Image (cartoon, grey):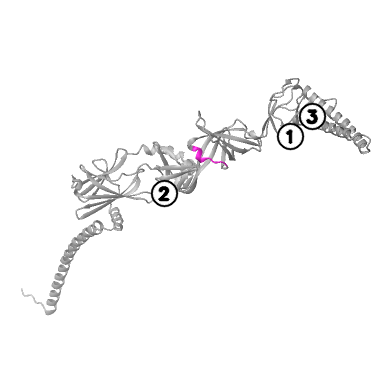
C-alpha cells in the first residue's frame, strides 16, 4: 500500500515530535529541579536551624533562639517530666533534665545530661542557668560535677517564681532551653484583692527614729503639792472644804478654836496697849524736857520704854504672821482659819467637825494638777539615751491618750536593789486626764537615720519563723523573705531581700498570708 505524504504533512509531524520531546524534557527537568530544591531547602533549613539557633554566641541571640524554639513547638506543652522527677528538655538526640532539689534547707539545681536516651557523664557539657525574677533581678547560676549529675554552685533563693534560660555547650554545639517557674505564687485577682481590702504600697526611703520605750507612772508634781497642817493645836469648828474640790489660793479650808492662838493674840493686844501708853509718856517727857522743866534723863527713859513696847508689838505680830493669821477681833481670839496655800485640788482630807487636832497633823493635801510628773526607771545601759531637756512622748496604757513632755530630771545614782536610775518627765495636764497612779509608756527618741528601703510595719509577717513580705506580681503575690532592721512602729527598715520601688501588700495583708497555705500545699521540688 503506497502512502502519499506531502511536504506539509511531514513538517507537521516533525513539529509534533519536537513539541513532545520538549514537553517530556520539561516535565523531567521540573521533577528533578523540585527534588533538588527540596533537598537544598531541607539542607538550608537544617543549616539555618543549626547556625541560627545553635551557633549564636551573643546573649541577644539567645532570646531569638528561644523564640524560634517556641515557634517550632519545642515547648508548646511545657517540658516533660524526667526520670529523676525534674523538667526534661530534649532537642534532637540531646536531652537535659533540670531538678530543683532541697538540700539542707537550701534549694539547688541538679542537671542530668543524656544522649539517645543514655546518660552522659556530668563533665560532658558545660551548663549554666540564668534566672530572672519578677522584679527584673537576674541571677547567673553555674554548675559543677557532683556524682552522676551537675549541681548548681549557688542556691536558688525562695520564692521560686522566675523565668529561666538553660544554656548548654556540648563540644562545639550549643543548646538553649527556657521555662517559667511559678512555685509558691499566691494567685489573687485584682477584684479579689480589692474586695479583701488589701492595699498596695511601694517600698521606698524614709527617716526612721529609733525609740526607747520605758515604763513609767504618773505622780503628783511635788513642786506643786502641799501637805497642809494647822500649826496650832485646837478643836475643829468648821470644815467647808470637801475632798476633790477645786480651791483657790487663800480660800478657807477649815476653822479651829485654839487656846494657843488666843494667848498669842492676847499678848499682841497687851503689847499694843503698853506701846500706846509708852508713846503718851514719851511725848509728855519730851515736851517737858524741851521746856526745860524735867531732866533729860526722864526723857531718855521714856524713849527707851517706848522702843521696848514697839519691839514687843512687832514680836507678837511676827508670831501671828508665822501662824498665818492676824490679831483677830476681841470676841474671837481663839478662831484660827486654815487656808489654801495655792490654787489646786483637795486630794486628801483628814479632818472632821469637832475633832481635836495637833499642830503638826496632816489635815489636807492639796495639789496643782495642771502639771504632773511621769517617773520612769532607766536601766544603766539606757542612761546615755535620755537627757535633761529632751522632748519625749508619753502614752497611756489603759486608754488611747498621748502627750508630749520634757525630761526634767535624770538621777545620778543607781539603786542597789533595782539597778536603775530615776528619771522624771514634766507633763502638762490642762484637762486632768493624766491622773496620778496611771501607768504609762515613755517613748524617747534615741537615734534618727535615713534608710533607703522601708515598708509599712503591718506588711511584715512571720512565716516559718522568718520575716516575710508579700510582693505584688501579675496575678497575685509572692512570699518574699527579708531581713528587717530598725523600726519606729509605723515603718520598718528592710536590710536585705527587697529593692526600693517594689510593690507589696500593706494593710490587710494578713488576707494574703491566709492564702499562703493553699499555695504551700502545692510546693514541691
Give me the disc on residue 249.
1
In percent of width and height, residue 383 lies at 51, 38
Mark 3 or mark 2: whose residue is earlier in sequence:
3
Q: Does the magenta stretch include residue 385?
A: yes
Q: What element carries label 2?
A: loop
Residue numbers of the magenta segment: 382-388
Question: What residue lies at 75% left-to-right and 25% top-to-bottom?
Answer: 239
Report the disc number at residue 316: 3
Label 1 vs 3, first from the N-terminus: 1
Q: Which of 261 and 109 is in front in this view?
A: 261
Is label 1 or label 2 in front?
Answer: 1
Q: Eyeballing the image, is 466 above or below 233?
A: below
Question: Marks 1 and 3, how far apart in space?
Answer: 25 Å
**Mark 3 to mark 2 CA distance (whole Å):** 85 Å
Asked whether residue 190 appears in the rendered view, the answer is no
Residue to which mark 2 is pinned: 499
Closest to the observer: 462 or 398?
398
Place residue 106 in its image quadrant: top left
Amino acid at each position: 500500500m503506497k502512502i502519499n505524504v506531502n511536504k506539509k504533512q511531514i513538517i507537521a509531524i516533525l513539529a509534533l515530535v519536537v513539541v513532545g520531546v520538549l514537553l517530556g524534557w520539561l516535565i523531567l527537568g521540573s521533577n528533578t529541579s523540585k527534588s533538588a530544591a527540596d533537598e537544598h531547602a531541607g539542607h538550608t533549613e537544617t543549616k539555618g536551624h543549626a547556625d541560627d539557633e545553635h551557633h549564636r554566641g551573643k546573649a541577644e541571640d539567645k532570646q531569638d533562639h528561644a523564640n524560634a524554639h517556641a515557634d517550632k513547638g519545642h515547648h508548646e506543652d511545657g517540658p516533660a517530666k524526667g526520670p529523676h522527677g525534674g523538667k526534661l528538655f530534649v532537642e534532637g538526640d540531646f536531652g537535659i533534665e533540670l531538678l530543683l532539689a532541697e538540700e539542707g534547707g537550701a534549694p539547688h539545681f541538679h542537671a542530668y545530661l543524656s544522649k539517645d536516651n543514655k546518660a552522659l557523664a556530668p563533665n560532658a557539657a558545660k551548663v549554666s542557668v540564668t534566672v530572672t525574677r519578677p522584679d527584673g533581678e537576674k541571677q547567673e547560676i553555674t554548675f559543677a560535677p557532683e556524682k552522676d549529675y551537675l549541681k548548681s554552685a549557688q542556691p536558688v533563693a525562695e520564692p521560686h517564681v522566675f523565668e529561666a534560660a538553660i544554656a548548654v555547650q556540648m563540644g562545639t554545639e550549643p543548646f538553649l532551653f527556657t521555662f517559667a517557674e511559678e512555685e509558691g505564687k499566691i494567685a489573687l485577682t485584682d477584684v479579689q484583692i480589692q474586695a479583701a481590702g488589701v492595699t498596695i504600697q511601694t517600698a521606698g526611703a524614709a527617716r526612721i527614729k529609733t525609740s526607747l520605750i520605758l515604763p513609767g507612772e504618773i505622780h503628783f508634781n511635788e513642786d506643786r503639792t502641799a501637805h497642809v497642817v494647822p500649826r496650832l493645836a485646837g478643836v475643829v469648828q468648821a470644815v467647808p472644804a470637801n475632798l476633790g474640790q477645786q480651791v483657790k489660793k487663800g480660800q478657807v479650808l477649815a476653822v479651829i478654836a485654839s487656846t494657843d492662838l488666843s494667848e498669842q493674840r492676847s499678848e499682841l493686844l497687851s503689847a499694843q496697849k503698853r506701846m500706846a501708853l509708852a508713846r503718851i509718856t514719851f511725848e509728855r517727857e519730851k515736851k517737858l524736857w524741851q521746856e526745860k522743866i524735867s531732866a533729860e534723863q526722864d526723857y531718855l527713859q521714856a524713849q527707851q520704854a517706848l522702843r521696848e513696847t514697839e519691839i514687843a508689838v512687832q514680836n507678837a505680830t511676827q508670831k501671828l504672821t508665822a501662824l498665818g493669821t492676824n490679831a483677830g477681833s476681841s470676841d474671837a481670839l481663839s478662831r484660827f482659819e486654815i487656808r489654801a496655800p495655792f490654787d489646786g485640788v483637795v486630794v486628801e482630807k483628814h479632818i472632821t467637825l469637832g475633832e481635836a487636832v495637833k499642830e503638826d497633823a496632816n489635815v489636807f493635801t492639796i495639789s496643782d494638777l495642771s502639771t504632773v510628773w511621769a517617773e520612769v526607771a532607766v536601766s544603766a545601759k539606757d542612761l546615755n539615751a535620755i537627757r535633761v531637756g529632751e522632748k519625749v512622748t508619753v502614752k497611756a496604757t489603759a486608754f488611747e491618750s498621748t502627750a508630749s513632755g520634757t525630761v526634767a530630771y535624770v538621777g545620778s545614782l543607781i539603786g542597789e536593789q533595782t539597778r536603775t536610775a530615776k528619771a522624771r518627765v514634766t507633763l502638762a495636764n490642762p484637762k486632768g486626764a493624766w491622773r496620778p497612779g496611771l501607768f504609762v509608756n515613755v517613748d524617747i527618741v534615741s537615734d534618727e537615720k535615713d534608710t533607703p528601703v522601708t515598708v509599712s510595719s503591718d506588711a511584715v509577717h512571720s512565716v516559718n519563723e522568718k520575716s516575710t513580705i508579700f510582693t505584688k506580681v501579675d496575678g497575685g503575690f509572692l512570699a518574699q523573705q527579708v531581713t528587717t532592721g530598725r523600726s519606729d512602729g509605723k515603718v520598718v527598715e528592710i536590710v536585705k531581700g527587697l529593692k526600693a520601688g517594689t510593690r507589696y501588700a500593706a494593710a490587710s495583708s494578713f488576707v494574703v498570708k491566709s492564702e499562703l497555705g493553699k499555695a504551700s500545699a502545692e510546693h514541691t521540688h
